[in-house]
C-alpha cells in the first residue's frame, strides 16, 4: 500500500520558509465590541460579538459621523478589556490623550502605543516589521498563549503617498496619478494573510463622499475598491442630528449625533442591514441604540395597541411598555434569553428592512 504524503510536515516547512503565507482555517476566536450591541449583532451575528481579531475591519464615514469615536474610542477600550495591546496610527493628528481617557481608554505606554504617521508606506513598513518580529517570537506558540494585539489606523483617507509629499515640497500639486488606491490595496492585501493565524486585528477608518449615481445612492468610500475587497468587515456611517433629550423627548436643539451605520460587507452575517446609534454629547454612546427597532422588526417585540409587548419564550413572562418605557434593563432581559442562541433571530418573521433605518432628508446635518 502506498504511503500517504505527510501534509502536516509539508505545512510546517511551508509556513516557516515563505513569508506572508499561512495554512489551515482561521475562523475568528476573539471578538471586540463596537460599543453598540445591535451593531455587534449586525456585524458578527452575535450580540456578544463585534469585530474579529485575525481580520481587517473598515469603518467609513463623513467627518464627524462618529467613526473615530467607535474605532479609536470604543473598540480600543473594549480590546484592552480583553487583554489586547493597541497600536494606534494617527494620520489626522486629532486623537488627544485627554479625549481618549474620557472614553476610558488606557493610554499608559504598556497598553497603548500611539504613532503619528503621514504616509501609507510608513504604516505598511511598521506593520511588516512588527509581523516579522511577532512571527519569530510567538509563531510557534499555541494560539491561546500568543499575545493579543489590535492595530487601529485613523484614518486611511488622510494618508499620503511619496508622490504627494514630493509634489508638495516642489510646490507643484498635480495629484498622485492614482498611486494612493493602489498603495491602500497593497497595504491591506499584504497584511490580511499575515495576521490571519494570530490574535491580531486591524481596524481602519476612512472617508466617504456622496454618490452621484441615482440608481446607487449609497455613499462611496474613498481610496478605490482594492482594499475593500480584502477587508472582512466594511461599515458605512452617515452623520445625522440627534434632537432628543435624555428622556427621549423631541427638542429643537441638537443634543448630539446619530451615527447611521450600515454593514456593507460582512462574512459573518447578512450585509446591508443598519442601525442608528445615538451618541449624546453629554453622556456618550447608548449601547442599546436601535435594538428596540430591530427586535420590533423581527417580530420578537410586537405592537399591542399603543404599547410594545414581549412574551418570554422561556418563562412566559410578559413585558408590556410604551416605547419610552423600554429602558435598557428591559432590553437586556431579551438579550439574556435570545442572546444564548443568536442564530434564532434569523428564523423570526422577516429580516430587517434597511428602509426602516434609513434617515429622512431633513435629518442630515448641514455641511456648510
Image: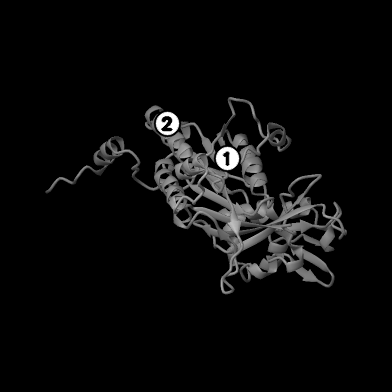
Chain-order first, disc 1 or disc 2: 1
Mark 2 packing: few (<14 Cα in 10 Å), some, or many (20+)? some
Relative to 215, residue 313 above or below: above
Q: Which residue is mark 1?
A: 91
Indicate left or right for 193 with 69 as reference. left
Find numbered disc 2 in the image and state the secondary structure of the residue it sits on: helix
Residue 195: x and y in percent read 43, 41
Residue 280 versus residue 364: which sits nearer the camera?
364
Indicate left or right for 291 with 60 as reference. right
* Residue found 71% across the figure and 38% down from its top: 103
Find numbered disc 1 in the image and state the secondary structure of the residue it sits on: loop
Residue 96: x and y in percent read 68, 34
Q: Which residue is mark 2?
A: 134
Residue 136: x and y in percent read 37, 29
Mark 1 packing: few (<14 Cα in 10 Å), some, or many (20+)? many
Measure how far apart labels 1 and 2 are at the Cα level: 24 Å
Relative to 189, residue 146 above or below: above
* Residue found 54% across the figure and 62% down from its top: 270
Mark 1 in CB contact with mark 2 (< 8 angstroms): no
* Residue found 15% across the figure and 45% down from its top: 3
Relative to 139, residue 195 above or below: below
Indicate left or right for 231 with 280 as reference. left
Q: Is residue 36 visible?
A: yes
Task: For the C terminus, give its image quadrant.
Answer: bottom right
Amino acid at each position: 500500500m502506498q504511503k500517504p504524503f505527510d501534509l502536516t510536515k509539508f505545512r510546517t516547512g511551508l509556513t516557516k520558509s515563505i513569508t506572508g503565507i499561512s495554512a489551515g482555517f482561521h475562523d475568528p476566536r476573539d471578538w471586540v465590541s463596537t460599543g453598540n450591541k445591535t451593531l455587534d449583532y449586525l456585524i458578527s451575528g452575535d450580540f456578544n460579538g463585534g469585530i474579529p481579531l485575525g481580520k481587517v475591519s473598515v469603518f467609513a464615514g463623513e467627518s464627524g459621523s462618529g467613526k473615530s469615536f467607535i474605532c479609536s474610542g470604543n473598540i480600543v477600550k473594549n480590546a484592552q478589556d480583553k487583554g489586547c495591546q493597541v497600536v494606534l496610527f494617527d494620520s489626522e493628528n486629532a486623537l488627544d490623550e485627554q479625549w481618549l481617557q474620557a472614553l476610558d481608554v488606557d493610554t499608559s505606554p504598556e497598553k497603548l502605543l500611539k504613532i503619528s504617521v503621514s504616509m501609507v508606506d510608513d504604516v505598511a513598513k511598521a506593520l511588516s516589521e512588527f509581523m516579522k518580529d511577532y512571527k519569530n517570537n510567538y509563531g510557534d506558540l499555541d494560539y491561546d498563549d500568543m499575545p493579543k494585539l489590535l492595530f487601529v489606523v485613523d484614518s486611511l483617507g488622510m494618508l499620503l503617498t511619496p508622490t504627494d509629499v514630493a509634489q508638495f515640497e516642489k510646490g507643484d500639486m498635480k495629484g498622485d496619478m492614482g498611486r494612493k488606491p493602489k498603495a491602500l490595496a497593497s497595504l491591506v492585501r499584504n497584511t490580511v494573510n499575515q495576521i490571519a493565524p494570530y490574535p491580531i486585528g486591524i481596524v481602519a477608518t476612512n472617508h466617504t463622499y456622496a454618490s452621484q449615481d441615482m440608481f446607487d445612492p449609497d455613499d462611496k468610500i474613498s481610496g478605490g475598491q482594492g482594499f475593500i475587497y480584502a477587508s472582512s468587515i466594511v461599515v458605512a456611517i452617515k452623520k445625522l442630528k440627534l434632537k432628543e433629550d435624555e428622556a427621549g423627548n423631541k427638542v429643537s436643539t441638537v443634543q448630539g449625533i446619530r451615527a447611521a451605520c450600515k454593514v456593507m460587507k460582512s462574512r459573518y452575517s447578512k450585509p446591508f442591514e443598519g442601525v442608528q446609534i445615538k451618541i449624546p454629547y453629554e453622556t456618550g454612546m447608548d449601547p442599546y441604540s436601535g435594538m428596540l427597532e430591530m427586535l420590533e422588526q423581527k417580530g420578537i417585540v410586537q405592537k399591542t395597541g399603543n404599547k410594545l409587548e414581549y412574551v418570554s419564550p422561556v418563562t412566559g413572562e410578559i413585558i408590556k411598555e410604551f416605547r419610552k418605557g423600554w429602558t435598557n434593563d428591559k432590553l437586556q432581559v431579551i438579550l439574556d434569553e435570545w442572546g444564548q442562541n443568536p442564530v434564532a433571530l434569523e428564523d423570526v418573521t422577516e429580516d430587517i428592512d434597511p428602509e426602516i433605518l434609513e434617515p429622512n432628508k431633513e435629518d442630515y446635518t448641514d455641511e456648510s
